Amino acid sequence: MNDIVLGDVTVTRVMEYFGSVELSPATFFPDSRPESWESEGDWLVPDFYDPGSGMCVAALQTWVLRSAGATILVDTGAGNLKQRPGTVWHRLETDFLGNLARAGVHPDDVDVVVNTHLHNDHVGWNTILDDGNWVPTFPNARYVMPRADFDFWNPANGNPSRLGAASHAVFEDSVAPVHQAGLVDLWDTHLDIDENLRLEPAPGHTPGSSLLTLESGTDRAVFVGDLLHTALQVTEPDVNSCFCENPAEARATRRRVLGRAADTHTLVFPAHFGGHGAAEVRYRGDGFAVTQWADFARATRG
C-alpha cells in the first residue's frame, strides 16, 4: 500500500531510489557513536544500515499530496542525468516519472511543487533535459521555495557552504530554470498552501530548511525534509548529518519538531526514510522513540 488518508488529504509515496548512499555511519553522521549502530541494529537493519557493507541506506522519495482539489509534490529527488560527481546521484537514471504515472500523476497534473530545501536530492526532478536544455518538469505548477535557501545557494551571492562549488551546478540545472520560467514562489516566515497545509521554517540543515505541516480533521502530519536522515536521529536527536550547515541550530530544530510531534501525536514524514517511510514518536529518556510506523508498504531495495 502506497497511499494513506489523513483527514481530507491523501498521501502517496512515490519512490525514486532506495539503497546504499555509499557513506559509512562515521562519514554520514560524524556525531554518532559506533556502538549506537550496533545496539540499535535490530531496527536500523536493513532499512537504514547495511552491516555487510558497513554503509548507510536511504530512500529518495516524493510525497504526493492530494489536498483541496490540488496535486502537490513534496520534494523532487535527485533527477536523471544530473552532473553530481562523487555521489550516488551522479547521472542517475530511474523511472521516477513512470512511478509517478503509476500513482496517477502526469507532470501536467501537478499544481504545486514544494522544495523543503534546495539540496541536490530535493530539487532534481524540478527539471528535465530537453534538447540540451534544462526545462521545468511540471510546467503548470508553482514551485514553492524558501527564500533563505534560494539566496544562500545562488552562486551569484558567493556564500561559503559545506558543499562548496558542487552546489552551483544544482542551482543552475534544477533551480534557476524554473525561476527563469516564472514558476517560483519564494516565501519567508510561513506560507499557507491551503486550509490543510502550511509551510514553516526549520533552519539548521540549511538556512532555509522548512517543514510542511498537515492538519485535517483530527489527523496531524509533518513533512520534515532532512531534519532526519536516519531513524537513529529519533533516539539520538543530537546526531547531525555531515551536511548540516549550522549544527547547533539543526540539533535545536530537530528536538523542537520531534517534541511537538510527540506532544500532538503527529505522524513524521522524513524525506529519506526507507522501511515504512514515516512514524509516530514519543519521548524516551533524553530522546524519542518510534511508537508506530505508517501504513505504507515496506520499501524494498532495487
Image: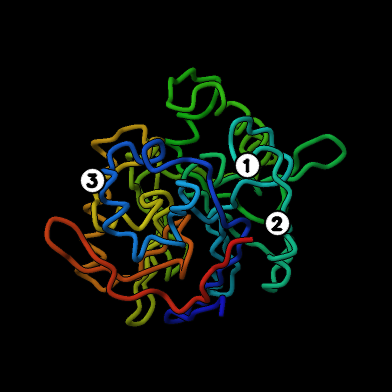
Q: Residue flagged by tag 1: what amino acid is it?
A: Trp
The numbered dot on residue 238 is 3
The kind of secondary structure element at disc 2 is loop
Residue 228 horizontal/vertical position (percent):
37, 52
Check whether the beta carbons of the residues at disc 3 and disc 1 lie within 8 A of each other: no
The kind of secondary structure element at disc 3 is loop
| Residue at x 51%, y 39% (from the top left corner) | 119
Check whether the beta carbons of the residues at disc 3 and disc 2 lie within 8 A of each other: no
Quarter of the picture containing the C terminus is bottom right
Quarter of the picture containing the N terminus is bottom right
The numbered dot on residue 89 is 1
Residue 230 horizontal/vertical position (percent):
38, 54
Residue 106 horizontal/vertical position (percent):
74, 65
**Number of residues whose C-alpha sits closer than 10 Å to that of mark 2, classed few (under 14), some (14–19) or many (20 or more):** some
The numbered dot on residue 285 is none
Which residue occupies the foreground of this view, 267 or 137?
267
| Residue at x 53%, y 27% (from the top left corner) | 154
Check whether the beta carbons of the residues at disc 1 and disc 2 lie within 8 A of each other: no
The kind of secondary structure element at disc 1 is loop
The numbered dot on residue 140 is 2
| Residue at x 68%, y 33% (from the top left corner) | 83
